[in-house]
Amino acid sequence: MSDSRKKKRKKKSWSIYKLGLRTAVYTAILTSIVLFLVLWLAYGFVPKEAGTFAGLFTVLVFIVTYGVNFSLEYRRLETLERITKNIIRKRFMEYEDVTTTYHDEVDYLIKQAIKSSRTIER
């Protein structure tokens, strides 16, 4: 594998890492706070015990959330990259199988890339 391909792959992985990290951190912190309050107020745990359980749960939630988010974002960015590479190579395809369910920036870019592909094909 050439150096430029390695750099591109590393840059893409870093972008996906940052996307997954942000969501995982927010989700883990929010769930740990809720768990701490539930254990402390509803079940009468000592704050130290509730904090310990919430901390362990935070790590578990972070790992699971990051893994799921990373895999989803990776697939979506791979789709976007495939469409743009096909445009560059002038290989125009129908992208009926591409679904945009999240309605965020990545979905918007995918939709715009599909529109661009159709426009350039004409």
Image: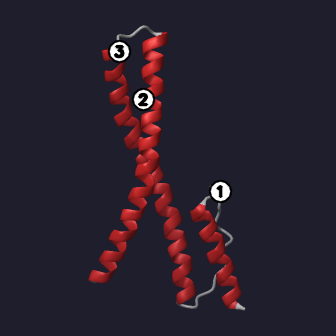
Query: In the picture shown, does residue 72 fall above or below 52?
Result: below
Disc 1 marks a residue whose amino acid type is Thr
Q: Position of residue 75 (x, y in %)?
A: 50, 63
- Answer whether labels 2 and 3 touch (C-beta < 8 Å): no
Q: Is residue 79 visible?
A: yes
Query: Which circle marks residue 32 in the picture?
Result: 2
Q: Earlier in the sequence, mark 1 or mark 3?
A: 3
Q: Residue at x 36, y 70 (%)?
A: 11
Element at label 2: helix
The residue singled out by tag 1 in the image is 101
Query: In the picture shown, does residue 76 fall above or below 58?
Result: below
Rendered-image quadrant of the C terminus: bottom right
The residue singled out by tag 3 in the image is 47
Query: In the picture shown, does residue 104 fall above or below 81?
Result: above
Q: Is residue 1 visible?
A: no
- Local crowd size for mark 2, using a 10 Å CA cut-off: few (<14), some (14–19), many (≥20): many
